[in-house]
Image: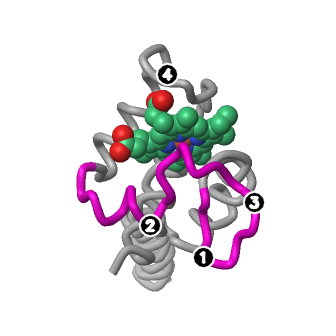
Amino acid sequence: MPTKLMLQAWAILGTLLVMFVGESTAADPRNGERIAERWCSGCHIVTSGQQQGSDQIPTFAQIGRSGRFDEQSLGVFLRAPHHSRMPNLSLTRSEVADLVAWIESHSR
Ligand code: HEC
């Protein structure tokens, strides 16, 4: 029966679409935490439990509270390292989104 087959095809397509859309819109703060600990905690105080870091460098809590960084501006900031003492970290758009989600969830 071709109609049943078509229904199945649509169902699969629909599932893929939902997965794809879910993937691209929902930032994952837990992945943001992993990125932060791996790439940022050498200099920034990333978590409140962290022992090492520099008092010359804003903590992630301060960065979050400042409200100056959303997905867009953090992405721009991280891609423009020439005016900063930060290393050139090439993170993808979705990694930046995850970072921002995590920073924001820790600043409230
Ligand atoms: C090698 C040390 C180092 C690493 C690693 C590092 N940073 Fe920084 N960061 C700094 C310094 C130093 C500053 C102070 C501002 C400046 O000189 O640009 C800074 C400033 C910032 C600021 C700006 C704060 C403000 O209010 O202007 C943001 C946002 C930031 N860092 C995010 C990150 C993120 C996200 C990561 C990890 C992906 C990271 N940094 C990794 C050293 C570092």
Residue range (magenta) = 45-68
Residue beneath disc 1: 48
Q: Nearer the viewer, residue 17 or 39?
A: 39
Q: Is residue 9 above or below residue 83?
A: below
Say left or right for 83 vs 57.
Answer: left
Q: Secondary structure at mark 4?
A: helix
Residue at image position (61%, 71%) is 47
Q: At which x and y percent is residue 46?
A: 60, 63
- Residues under labels 3 and 1: Cα distance? 11 Å
Mark 4 vs mark 2, foreground winner is 2
- Residues under labels 1 and 4: Cα distance? 26 Å
**Magenta segment main secondary structure:** loop
Q: Residues within 10 Å of mark 1 (few under 14, many from 20)?
A: few
Disc assigned to residue 61? 2
Q: At which x and y percent is residue 89?
A: 61, 32
Mark positioned earlier in the residue sequence (1 or 4): 1
Q: Is residue 2 visible?
A: no
